[in-house]
Image: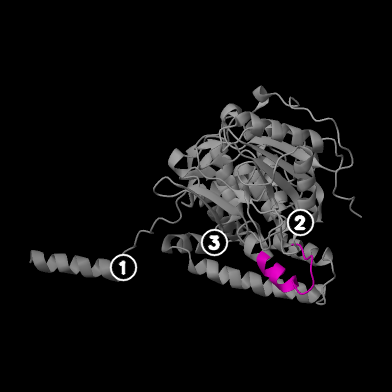
Amino acid sequence: MNTALTLSTLPTLLTDCVLVGHAKRADVIWTPRQWFEMCIHMMNDNPSNFFLMPYRDDGGMPRFKKAFRADVEKRIMWAWDTIRGRAKPERAGSIGFYPTNAQRQSRWAAMDFDMHDDDQMRARDCAHKAFACLIREPQLFVALTTSAGDPQHSGWHLFIFTADFYPCEDWTRLLKQVADQIQAPVKPGICEIFPDGSRGIGRGIRAPGTYNPKNGECSLILYETVTKLLPNGQPTALPKEKLCSLGTRSTPRGKTSSLPSSEFFKITAASTRHSKLLQLVGFLFHQCGKEVARKQAELQHTEASPAPVASLTEHLAEFEGAWAGMERQWKRKLSPGEREKRDGLTTETEREAFRIIRNWSQTDSGDSDFYVHCETLGERLRITLQGAADIRRRFCSSGILRKTAEYEPRKKAARYEWIASHEPKRKQSALSKSAWKTSIKTRTA
């Protein structure tokens, strides 16, 4: 049973608990895997399009809108590329999350201390006092950040994380206790809290370290303990090859790779099994082979709480139907060149690799080339590292991939371009060649 979400102690409050000079970019504090896991945690088991998209419109004005058709996985990577300085300024991306879900529960909350009145010291003192209140609570994990860029000219964000879900009203009560303790009125321009007790989904807030479209800078991290909450800080795999490490370990055949994003699709309420299954299939179809996805669907049913009415056999039969439907839709979207290349493949494993790598090629970062990480590909297909490398080599020789950058030992992986979509060259039939020759002879005579 969860411990009560409340302040157990009221310590003497300090205003210098963190040195401003300690502020660092998120990519200095966290590895790509850790930051991705934190974002997954902040999704609160919501659907994959339930997040906030901060951006600048064509006129350069900041906008904050809820996603509807965007994919959270691509958006997380886009935000991470922006943090690392890999995204072009005009294509800078950010991401935020909502501290609630369908059950009106959350496993994180936040406080925003603004300096709209240019009183930077007031915002800084409030943030540090709130930090001092919460850092002593053993069930809480925190991240103290600037709202954007230089701590001397920025507001402050304080994120609080828990391992378990708590009702949103409990979070609101806790944040109000903290605000009362540090004597910070909860109102715009001074202190805003997330969740704030409003009905509906409420307001979202940018993830720690992300790009702020208001001034074009990324938040900086002063202190965090949320890394301790992540699963050893090292999830076994990521749903996108771009964020994976460049190790050389092979994956034993039969080992199922763990896809963190499948956490979105756990069955946690009655009468949601079918919809959760369809969401799971829709996501995994582009990420892994059918055998791996089927194992995920089996785990989804086995770990469901409450237990579904439908049996596991019925659940897996629905999986087969949903997967077949996704495959039909996907094939219709292939270009003529892609259809020709895919039809020329001789094994189902190669055809599944074609589907996965094609998805990897469709990045939002603006780059035309991308990594094809063999270890990750092997995990997704349940084949060996050597088997994945052989597939990559065959794809290059058959005109599906083209290498654009060589491998640099212990520095950079090789990069590739997807060229299967190029239109196939039309071959003249024997009949047309004969007719052409006849035409030439006639004109010559």
| Dot label at residue 69 | 3
For the residues labelled 3 and 2, say whether their Cβ atoms are less than 8 Å apart. Answer: no
- Using residue 159 as the reference point, say whether residue 69 is left or right of it: left
> Which residue, given by chain and number where applicable, does mark 1 sit on?
430
Picture quadrant where residue 347 is located: bottom right
Note whether 370 is above or below 338 in the view shown.
above
| Dot label at residue 373 | none
Q: Dot 1, crowdedness within 10 Å: few (<14), some or many (≥20)?
A: few
- Asked if residue 367 can be seen in this view, the reply is no
Q: Residue 121 at x, y = what percent?
A: 64, 28
Q: Residue 126 at x, y = what percent?
A: 70, 34
SS label for mark 1: helix
Picture quadrant where residue 202 is located: bottom right
Closer to the camera, 346 or 269? 269
Mark 3 to mark 2: distance in Å?
26 Å
> Which residue, given by chain and number where applicable, does mark 2 sit on?
168
